[in-house]
Image (cartoon, rainbow, N blue to C red):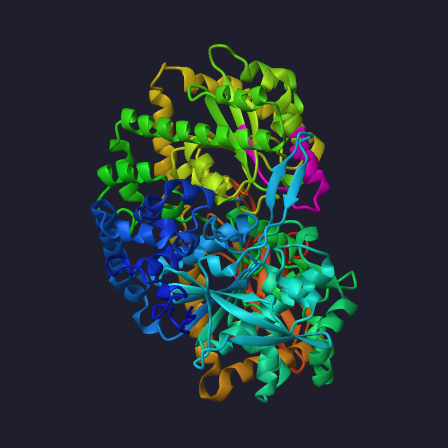
């Protein structure tokens, strides 16, 4: 067996099993099997299915296993099978074309090809055959990498390789989730071991407390790019350490922090060992925030002072936060962090406090990964418009309690990878009616208008096929559940009659975290009964999802859904499918009529499953939370209403009422109003596709990341470190100086013409009389030009009160470092009652106006 994966772009790769003597005619099959590009090319998937359809399904569509385990005689016969060869050639042609065509990035940023963006994530969901994801965060990371490849963005993924993946979910006859451990054989997954030039396993070493853990590196080829995964399960590591990459989100806090050290510190070391020129570090959620600690250490080793090192790391890091609840952020006891970094802290004793300070919480003795990430990444974002706002509110105190809207955390709304999630039958239909280059230009909303040209009959017919396919798959899933649970034969066979393609079908599938309130619809079983069992207009529900093995309330939800599904009146009409994964997700988001999502607002940072559904003409029915808050336009789906300020119980009551009412009065009637072909329903499907598909895809999302974060970060860091770190040293020194001297800054007086010393009224606009305001400020050692002096008042607009920030101009220097400023504002505004004056430090080299949490106001 030859193992040889070359470092770098991942294209000059030899494959482990090239000595398996595939016939000449199909010798490039491993190239396809070892690049998860297959997961978004329907012809490639079909090619592998054609090898052995039944086995393909049994082994969860894993082309590498198929390759390794198929009898040589089969390859011989396939190499003479014209139909197979034709498809093989066709797939290779697409593959070669894919890699050679000029990309969006090359065309848009031709001068920025020298450096790579490292993308860190604790999980990646590329395909069901590579089970290193638990839910939305991982799928998002997978979709991000896929679009980065499609767009030609030089991005390298960094993650961990879990020996047992997440877990397989089985449901027993009590409705309890059984978490089944599967131990994966890495040589049979779409992964390549990374080797050194001498042919040995490339390894990196990470200090964990007083011991050293060695990690091997595996490579996942993702189209044009690579994702590198770290593996601690190797000889030489202690048994406890070998388990560290055992399970995704498995174990206690000790394991969790150790995993995060491996990801953050080990990830940076892997980039160095791979010799990848990396300039931008994007961390997907706080799990990987320790990357900053390792990169600061590297700078120290090079003789860079600590405060300059922090500045370099900040300037080159991008942080995406995903958790809208404070309790959801990882935070570790301080002694734990001190233990895990003890080697580092004993080497650099003098910086230990400063290091720890980067992650300290304000009020509790905890080291918070989100705080670390915020302190060490200049650009930060939430994952939907609403989540951006929630994050800014949550981290206001971090930024000197400025107005929420000024907190330097933006948002880039999530999306989904179109080619991964769109049903192939629909893709063919879109191919017929949309302009030829629609997929490459999927972010162009104009082009999606042609969806309206699709005859409702054609759309409906395909939708119907997809629904039938889902129902067949769901029955097989239920039959397997019952067979395994030793139910009598008649109970196993009973599922043949479950579900109907004629009934309005509602899907609910996601992780069973309690805030997602999967059981909300069961609040009034009588009312649900009337909907489900309406003889003319029946409704049926499919549920699926895993609960984290430590989440007992989540598992109780599963039991509740199961209990309801077993009631006579709901049997075969409300079903609970087991082992939700990307495979089942595809069936569901392509096959139901309505996608239901009813989280407790604003806990759903974005949500992406509804976006997958929307692409496929499945209509969203959701709380106005996460992405749906901005995606819903009143006619491309339905909202679930309820007051947003009320307490949780009240919200729940109102949301439940809204769900039933809309189902009864709008959704069911629309679906059933025109017999077999519901024209109005199809019209709404089209509206949903055409308004949502161009926006909520990862091409748009990754372009946003590139334009708004990667390229600005790349330019900024390169200019900061040019000339032997000249600019970054100045910024760091400046910050240090400002921190030390800010307490001297004092606003001595504000004169708004109403406090005894009238300033002359100034009329600049007859309709809005205005006046001059002055502020007198003592700066101490800080140069006044290094600050911004602003007057802030609030203005009422149709959507609420907005801050208006008026820059004040220096009027005269009064000596002794005291400067008087002026501004002109509407004359009715009075100091304290209506406006305040504030001073904060600024610099052209800052990434944002509130880079430092220093604001003095009066
Ligand atoms: C898309 C997806 C998710 C995320 O679903 P949300 O509704 O956004 O939480 C979780 N699990 C799987 C398998 C998915 O495909």
Compared across the picture, whether 742 is left or right of 31 comes to: right
Outermost residue toward the top in this view: 535
Quarter occupied by the C terminus: bottom right
**Residue 460 lies in quadrant:** top left
Residue 463 covered by magenta stretch: no
Residue, x 36% and y 14% (percent of image)? Answer: 675
Does any portion of residue 756 appear in the rendered image? no
Q: Nearer the viewer, residue 128 or 238?
A: 238
Q: Along the line of sight, which residue is nearer the eye, 530 or 501? A: 501
Q: Is residue 232 visible?
A: yes
For image coordinates 41% across by 44% down, the residue present is 56
Query: Viewer-proximal residue, 687 or 770?
Result: 687
Horizontal side of 91 relative to 36 (left or right) equals left
The residue drawn where x is 42% and y is 53% is 69
Q: Position of residue 90 (x, y in %)?
A: 23, 51
Q: Nearer the viewer, residue 179 or 224?
A: 179
Vertical position of residue 299 compared to residue 799: above or below: below
Residue placed farthest to the front in the image? 73
Residue 520, horizontal then vertical, whole percent: 63, 29
Residue span colored magenta: 542-561
**Magenta span contains residue 552:** yes
State left or right for residue 568 relative to residue 450. right
Question: Percent from the top left, x then y, of residue 106?
Answer: 30, 66
**Residue 355, image x and y in percent?**
69, 75
Figure check: 190 above or below 489: below
- On-image quarter of the N terminus: bottom left
* Relative side of 260 to 222, left or right: right
């Amino acid at each position: 067996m030859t193992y040889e994966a070359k470092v770098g772009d991942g294209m000059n790769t030899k494959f482990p099993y090239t000595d398996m003597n595939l016939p000449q005619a199909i010798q490039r099959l491993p190239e396809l099997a070892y690049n998860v590009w297959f997961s978004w090319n329907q012809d490639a998937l079909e090619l592998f299915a054609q090898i052995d359809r039944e086995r393909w399904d049994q082994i969860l569509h894993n082309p590498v296993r198929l390759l390794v385990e198929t009898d040589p005689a089969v390859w011989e016969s396939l190499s003479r099978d014209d139909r197979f060869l034709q498809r093989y050639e066709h797939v290779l042609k697409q593959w070669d074309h894919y890699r050679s065509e000029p990309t969006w990035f090359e065309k848009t940023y031709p001068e920025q090809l020298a450096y790579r963006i490292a993308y860190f994530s604790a999980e990646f969901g590329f395909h069901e055959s590579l089970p290193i994801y638990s839910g939305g965060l991982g799928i998002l990371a997978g979709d991000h990498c896929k679009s980065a490849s499609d767009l030609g963005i030089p991005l390298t993924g960094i993650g961990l390789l879990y020996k047992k993946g997440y877990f397989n979910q089985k449901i027993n006859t009590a409705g309890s989730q059984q978490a089944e451990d599967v131990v994966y054989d890495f040589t049979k997954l779409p992964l390549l071991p990374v080797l050194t030039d001498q042919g040995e396993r490339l390894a990196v070493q990470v200090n964990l407390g007083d011991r050293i853990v060695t990690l091997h590196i595996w490579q996942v080829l993702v189209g044009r790019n690579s994702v590198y995964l770290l593996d601690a399960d190797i000889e030489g590591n202690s048994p406890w350490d070998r388990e560290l990459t055992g399970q995704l989100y498995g174990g206690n806090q000790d394991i969790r922090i150790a995993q995060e050290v491996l990801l953050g510190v080990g990830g940076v070391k892997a980039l160095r060992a791979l010799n990848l020129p990396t300039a931008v570090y994007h961390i997907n959620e706080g799990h990987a925030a320790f990357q900053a600690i390792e990169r600061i250490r590297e700078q120290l080793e090079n003789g860079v002072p600590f405060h300059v090192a922090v500045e370099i790391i900040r300037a080159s890091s991008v942080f995406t936060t995903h958790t809208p609840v404070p309790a959801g952020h990882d935070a570790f006891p301080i002694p734990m962090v001190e233990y895990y970094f003890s080697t580092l802290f004993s080497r650099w004793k003098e910086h230990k406090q400063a290091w720890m300070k980067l992650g300290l919480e304000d009020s509790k003795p905890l080291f918070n990964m989100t705080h670390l990430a915020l302190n060490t990444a200049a650009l930060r974002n939430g994952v939907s418009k609403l989540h951006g706002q929630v994050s800014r509110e949550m981290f206001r105190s971090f930024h000197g309690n400025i107005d929420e809207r000024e907190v330097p955390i933006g948002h880039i709304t999530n999306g989904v990878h179109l080619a991964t999630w769109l049903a192939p039958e629909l893709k063919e239909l879109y191919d017929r009616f949309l302009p030829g280059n629609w997929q490459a230009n999927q972010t162009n909303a104009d082009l999606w208008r042609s969806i309206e040209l699709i005859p409702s009959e054609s759309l409906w017919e395909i939708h119907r096929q997809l629904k039938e396919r889902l129902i067949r798959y769901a029955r097989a899933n239920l039959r397997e559940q019952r067979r395994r649970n030793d139910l009598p034969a008649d109970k196993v066979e009973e599922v043949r009659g479950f579900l109907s393609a004629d009934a309005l079908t509602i899907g609910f599938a996601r992780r069973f975290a309690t805030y997602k309130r999967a059981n909300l619809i069961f609040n009034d079983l009588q009312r649900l009964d009337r909907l489900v069992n309406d003889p003319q207009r029946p409704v049926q529900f499919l549920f699926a999802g895993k609960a984290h093995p430590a989440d007992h309330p989540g598992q109780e939800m599963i039991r509740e859904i199961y209990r309801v599904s077993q009631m006579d009146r709901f049997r075969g009409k409300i079903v609970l499918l087991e082992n939700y994964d990307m495979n089942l997700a595809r069936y569901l988001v392509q096959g139901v009529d309505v996608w239901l999502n009813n989280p407790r607002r604003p806990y759903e940072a974005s949500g992406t499953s509804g976006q997958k559904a929307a692409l496929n003409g499945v209509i969203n029915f959701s709380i106005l939370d996460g992405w749906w808050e901005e995606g819903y336009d009143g006619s491309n789906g339905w909202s679930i209403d309820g007051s947003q300020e009320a307490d949780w119980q009240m919200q729940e009551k109102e949301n439940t009422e809204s769900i039933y009412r809309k189902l009864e009065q709008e959704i069911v009637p629309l679906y059933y109003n025109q017999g077999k072909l519901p024209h109005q329903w199809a019209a709404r499907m089209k509206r949903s596709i055409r308004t949502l598909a161009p926006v909520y895809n990862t091409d748009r999302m990754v372009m946003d990341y590139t334009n708004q974060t990667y390229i600005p970060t790349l330019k900024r860091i390169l200019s900061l470190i040019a000339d032997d770190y000249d600019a970054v040293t100045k910024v760091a020194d400046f910050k240090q100086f400002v921190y030390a001297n800010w307490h001297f800054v004092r606003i001595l007086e504000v004169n708004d013409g109403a406090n005894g010393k009238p300033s002359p009224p100034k009329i600049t606009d007859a309709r809005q009389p205005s006046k001059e305001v002055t502020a007198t400020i003592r700066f101490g050692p800080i140069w006044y030009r290094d600050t911004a002096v602003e007057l802030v008042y609030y203005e009422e607009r149709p959507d609420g009160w907005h801050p208006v920030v008026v820059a004040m101009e220096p009027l005269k220097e009064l000596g002794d470092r005291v400067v008087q400023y002026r501004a002109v504002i509407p004359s009715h505004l009075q100091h304290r009652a209506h406006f305040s004056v504030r001073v904060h430090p600024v610099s052209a080299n800052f990434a944002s106006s509130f880079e430092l949490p220093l604001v003095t106001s009066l």
